[in-house]
Image: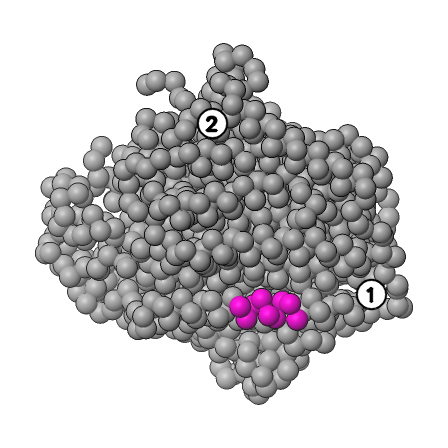
């Protein structure tokens, strides 16, 4: 048993309390250093866990409550490579996000404290092996998230988005809690491995299990913010401080998908008779998000709002990989989530350098020449990475997901991915093109430190490094999908070998598709910049924009209604197809 | 099921409906307080004294108080 | 969506959702039916293993203590969030004209209310402390007791002594107390890691079942949670009161209010 | 009849959601959310209930007496306090929104956030042609 397992959670939590205690005693630089040190400690512990998990899933029973006769008494962390890598990614992105906080003008102590709690929650979410514990961290993430979203209390968008975030995510959380109650009522346990084992003892269609799965999926989809649960995210990205937006784009939306695959592969894979239906639902929602949000990202002009839609589209791509219900799909999703998360964090840092670090309804701060060039360069490079240049992990991950989708019987989903990459790549490149020529105007001077640009470059470099991790991802995914082996590691029993690692790499076809997407994005962006308008009649495009704007006007009631519609639809589809 | 259980369950269901149906926040704070007490009683009946204690101190006292404070702030502001 | 379409669409979706939920809940065991669960196992184990009589507390602070650590930090984050969101901005310094001039003065408090409010405060505090200290024996604990103690502050407010109350503590002190409470829980966990080898491992003697000093670290955790909840709720209430009273012209004095957060 | 507790849980869930969806006042909307939350407590405690069993507090009952499930109670207990705090937080946001807009009607908050952007050269990227700025209808 590794003693490191609780530390990625415990250390940031302790540091959060410490920051709150000393914030008015020591200078701000010291507070910042404490926060940075805690984040770096989390990164080191997670990296060590990634290394240790290579020899097998690490199971850690809190309080020493090891299971009795195969029944769990307490809470366990079950750390496999993918989970540890998730905690690592959360730490890396949080470190980058901290770099944007030097200019916080008010209440910085509380913000640091909240960011540290958020990091601990993300790490716990990735590492835990207990269903209710997963829910606790899910809530903790949401609370830290919407508090930070309301940071700019002078901005209507910020406050409204925080409410929308809170209410929509709470509805998602209650759905998850209902599912937990159902599963506890059926199996009498909260441990993921044990629930899986108990359900597997009674195979065959089961309405309770089907609905529980549907509710868990919906709850986590709300967090992942895919269509039609994405309204809160768009508003939040427009109004939140940069530090939160970087974390949201870098890792948080992918964590929702992680929650789905984690519970699916530990609990339902061996039990549910509706496997194929779940996969099809996930792929369909993923494709709808990728195409719909991809197209909308070209409609809106505010750069942060645009990137919000890019985020939704890319989470859709990750979801397609998850919906393939195969080790290849998981490997592709993991590569894409890590590669794309770092790129998006770099994009938001680029926008901050361009002065887009206040809510959309605040005055924009105008950057100096150096910062503007750095911002444009980051956005241009990031745009190419967004479209999926094979140098970056976005290219590799996308190719692997396309491969997995074709094998799982969804070749059309592969087409959707390519189209989405073209659209979102063009959306980002357009921002870079426009920012290149943007002039000066009224407003404060943007005063981010110059080295923020270097942080952005480092994030892009990390994405390039992840692109070499294909074999690692394939082994990690093979362990991840080995349900029986997971249950054996956690609860004991006769040894089970994990699944064989699939071949994961950049095929020639995948590379060609990636290059086509990059070229397509470049052509689309420059073509739209040259032409007087989009490639459709002006009245149509105006109508589209009006409808899109009206649909995303930040209404909380609409967001809740869509959540109810989505829940009802997904639950019914799963229930019908499982009988 | 005993008559007590049925009665309190029906009361809780009706109480929740009243909370939502009361559209004026000041009245709603009072109804929500009552709903908190009903929930507390239900939890006692379901043999959960710990949760009942929690619900009564929170749902019937602390939460309505905060609603009233918010209202005081808002009513003090411009119309 | 307009409000009307939304209501119609929602009612349809909600009807479907309710039907599916009812269908699924039908798969649950009958209400009150007997069946095994890990909770029932703990009912058998907790008293002998932990010398604790309230099994719910045993689950909260021992068997599933790690969950409660997370819950405590949800509370922590929410309280900090309230402080962050209600922080006085530069433009809202007390007395600044940017705030509302309704001219509504705080009504004077009658002496009867004052006496009752102040008179009830000490017993409420004592009762809250009792609930915290006996959490492992009888229903109650840090969560409930903390709320009760914080409610005592409300009584002082009802007595119309907010400014006096405000002299008793400052927001910074409350934040520090909250930080100590939160750090205390993490500290107990780390103590287990250092002395027992596992995070949140019990490292104290279990004592005599039924005694206040029993159940190992559970009373210690209860205490730190109690501190956290008390300080947090008082901070939260103070922030609300501050919005209502101090930022409202016509308050009895120009109080020594918080500086804007920097 | 033994389905009644579950039915009440579903009813509270749907009613709370209805309140959120149709609300014309933010405070009402937030309190409706707590009704929604109450449904999860009712469900959890109903699942843990055992007919004829005592509360899981062995202070004044023999240790071998059957008691109801303590785990669901532990799950609900902390959530009650935490949920109320989160509600308080949402009320704080509502107070601030009222301060900014003078209104508590969620429908009055609906706005195209880019609405005023193009009127002010400092917002958005000033080169509207290249970004195809969404221009709101006037008024």
Q: With A211 as the anchor, is A176 left or right in this view?
A: left
**Residue nearest the viewer, comparing C161 with D68:** C161
The residue at which mark 1 appears reads as A488
Residue C256, magenta (yes or no): no
| Residue A172 visible, this orientation | no
User: Dot 2 lies on which element?
Assistant: helix
Magenta segment boundaries in residue numbering: A40-48
Figure check: A503 above or below A22: above
Percent position of residue A474, x then y: 79, 55
Percent position of residue A323, x then y: 75, 41
| Mark drawn on residue A55 | none
The residue at which mark 2 appears reads as D130
Figure check: C5 above or below A83: above
**Residue nearest the viewer, comparing A301 with A511:** A511
Host chain of mark 1? A
User: Where is residue C173, by image quadrant?
Assistant: bottom left
What residue is rendered at 60% in x and 55% in y?
A461
What residue is rendered at 63% in x and 53% in y?
A463
**Residue nearest the viewer, comparing A426 with A242:** A426
Host chain of mark 2? D
Percent position of residue D138, x then y: 34, 18
Judged by its main secondary structure, the magenta piece is helix
The CA span between labels 2 and 1 is: 57 Å
Discs 2, 1 touching: Cβ within 8 Å: no
Q: Quadrant of the C terminus of chain A?
A: top right
Q: Residues within 10 Å of mark 2 (few under 14, many from 20)?
A: many
User: Dot 1 lies on which element?
Assistant: helix
| Residue A82 visible, this orientation | yes
Figure check: D131 above or below A183: above
Residue A44, magenta (yes or no): yes
């Amino acid at each position: 048993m590794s003693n490191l397992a609780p530390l990625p959670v415990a250390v940031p939590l302790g540091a959060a309390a410490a920051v709150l205690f000393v914030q008015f005693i020591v200078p701000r630089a010291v507070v910042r250093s404490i926060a940075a040190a805690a984040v770096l400690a989390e990164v080191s512990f997670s990296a060590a866990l990634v290394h240790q998990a290579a020899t097998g899933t690490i199971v850690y029973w809190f309080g020493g409550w090891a299971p009795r006769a195969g029944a769990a008494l307490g809470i366990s962390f079950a750390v496999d490579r993918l989970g540890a890598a998730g905690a690592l990614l959360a730490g890396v992105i949080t470190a980058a996000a901290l770099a944007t906080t030097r200019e916080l003008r008010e209440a910085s102590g509380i913000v640091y404290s909240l960011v540290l709690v958020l990091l601990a929650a993300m790490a716990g979410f990735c590492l835990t092996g207990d269903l209710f514990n997963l829910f606790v961290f899910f809530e903790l993430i949401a609370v830290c998230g919407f508090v930070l979203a309301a940071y700019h209390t002078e901005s209507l968008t910020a406050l409204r988005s925080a409410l929308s975030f809170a209410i929509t995510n709470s509805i998602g959380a209650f759905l998850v809690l209902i599912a937990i109650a159902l599963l506890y009522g059926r199996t009498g346990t909260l441990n993921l491995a044990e629930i899986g084992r108990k359900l597997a003892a009674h195979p065959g269609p089961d309405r309770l299990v089907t609905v529980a799965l549907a509710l868990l999926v919906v709850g986590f989809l709300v967090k992942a913010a895919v269509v039609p649960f994405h309204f809160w995210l768009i508003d939040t990205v427009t109004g939140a401080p940069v530090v939160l937006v970087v974390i949201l784009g870098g890792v948080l939306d992918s964590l929702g998908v992680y929650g789905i695959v984690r519970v699916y592969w530990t609990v339902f894979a061996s039990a549910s008779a509706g496997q194929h239906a779940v996969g099809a639902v996930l792929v369909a929602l993923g494709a709808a998000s990728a195409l719909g949000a991809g197209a909308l990202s070209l409609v809106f002009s505010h750069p942060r709002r645009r990137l919000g839609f890019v985020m939704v589209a890319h989470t859709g791509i990750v979801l397609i990989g998850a919906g393939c219900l195969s080790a290849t799909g998981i490997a592709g999703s993991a590569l894409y989530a890590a590669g794309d998360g770092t790129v998006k964090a770099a994009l938001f840092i680029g926008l901050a350098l361009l002065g887009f670090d206040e809510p959309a309804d605040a005055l924009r701060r105008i950057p100096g020449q150096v910062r503007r060039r750095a911002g444009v360069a980051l956005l241009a490079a990031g745009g190419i990475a967004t479209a999926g240049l094979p140098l970056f992990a976005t290219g590799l991950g996308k190719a692997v997901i396309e491969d997995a989708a074709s094998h799982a019987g969804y070749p059309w989903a592969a087409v959707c991915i390519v189209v989405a990459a073209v659209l979102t790549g063009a959306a980002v490149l357009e921002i870079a093109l426009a920012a290149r020529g943007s002039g000066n105007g009224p407003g404060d001077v943007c005063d981010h430190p110059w080295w923020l640009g270097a942080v952005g470059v480092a994030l892009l470099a990390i994405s390039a490094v992840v692109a070499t991790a294909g074999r690692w991802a394939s082994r990690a995914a093979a362990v991840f999908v080995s349900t029986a082996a997971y249950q054996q590691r956690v609860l004991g029993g006769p040894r089970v070998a994990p699944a064989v690692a699939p071949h994961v790499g950049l095929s020639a076809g995948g590379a060609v598709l990636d290059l086509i997407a990059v070229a397509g994005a470049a052509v689309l962006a420059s073509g739209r910049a040259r032409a007087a308008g989009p490639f459709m009649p002006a009245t149509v495009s105006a109508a589209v924009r009006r409808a899109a704007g009206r649909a995303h006007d930040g209404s909380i009631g609409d967001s809740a209604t869509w959540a109810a519609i989505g829940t009802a639809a997904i639950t019914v589809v799963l229930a019908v197809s499982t009988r | 099921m005993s008559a007590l259980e049925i009665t309190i369950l029906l009361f809780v269901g009706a109480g929740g409906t009243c909370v939502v149906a009361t559209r004026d926040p000041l009245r709603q704070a009072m109804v929500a307080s009552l709903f908190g007490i009903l929930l507390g009683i239900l939890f006692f009946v379901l043999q959960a004294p710990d949760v009942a204690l929690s619900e009564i101190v929170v749902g019937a006292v602390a939460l309505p108080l905060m609603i009233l404070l918010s209202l005081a702030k808002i009513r003090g502001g411009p119309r | 969506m307009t409000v009307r379409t939304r209501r119609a669409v929602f009612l349809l979706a909600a009807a479907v959702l309710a039907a599916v939920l009812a269908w699924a809940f039908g798969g649950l065991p009958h209400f009150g039916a007997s069946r095994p669960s890990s909770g029932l196992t703990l009912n058998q184990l907790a008293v002998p293993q932990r010398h604790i009589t309230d099994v719910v507390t045993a689950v909260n602070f021992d068997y599933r203590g790690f969950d409660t650590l997370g819950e405590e930090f949800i509370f922590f984050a929410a309280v900090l969030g309230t402080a962050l969101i209600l922080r006085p901005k530069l433009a809202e310094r007390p007395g600044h004209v940017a705030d509302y001039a309704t001219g509504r003065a705080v009504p004077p408090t009658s002496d009867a209310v004052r006496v009752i409010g102040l008179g009830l405060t000490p017993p409420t505090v004592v009762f809250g402390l009792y609930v915290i200290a006996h959490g492992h024996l009888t229903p109650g604990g840090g969560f409930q007791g903390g709320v009760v103690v914080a409610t005592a502050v409300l009584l002082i407010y009802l007595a119309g002594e907010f400014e006096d109350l405000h002299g008793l503590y400052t927001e910074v002190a409350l934040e520090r107390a909250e930080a100590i409470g939160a750090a205390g829980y993490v500290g107990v966990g780390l103590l287990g890691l250092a002395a027992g080898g596992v995070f949140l491992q019990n490292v104290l003697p279990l004592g005599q079942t039924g005694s206040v000093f029993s159940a190992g670290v559970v009373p210690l955790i209860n205490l730190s949670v109690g501190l956290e909840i008390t300080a947090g709720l008082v901070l939260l209430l103070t922030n609300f009161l501050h919005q209502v009273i101090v930022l409202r012209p016509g308050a009895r004095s120009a109080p020594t209010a918080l500086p804007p957060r920097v | 009849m033994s389905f009644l507790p579950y039915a009440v849980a579903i009813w509270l869930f749907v009613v709370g959601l209805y309140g959120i969806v149709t609300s014309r006042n933010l405070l009402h909307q937030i309190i409706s959310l707590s009704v929604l939350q109450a449904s999860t407590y009712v469900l959890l405690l109903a699942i843990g209930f055992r007919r004829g069993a005592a509360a899981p507090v062995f202070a004044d009952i023999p240790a071998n007496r059957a008691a109801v499930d303590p785990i669901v109670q532990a799950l609900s207990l902390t959530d009650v306090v935490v949920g109320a705090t989160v509600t308080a937080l949402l009320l704080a946001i509502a107070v601030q929104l009222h301060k900014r807009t003078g209104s508590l009607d969620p429908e009055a908050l609906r706005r195209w956030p880019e609405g005023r952007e193009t009127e002010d050269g400092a917002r958005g990227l000033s080169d509207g042609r290249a970004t195809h700025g969404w221009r709101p209808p006037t008024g």
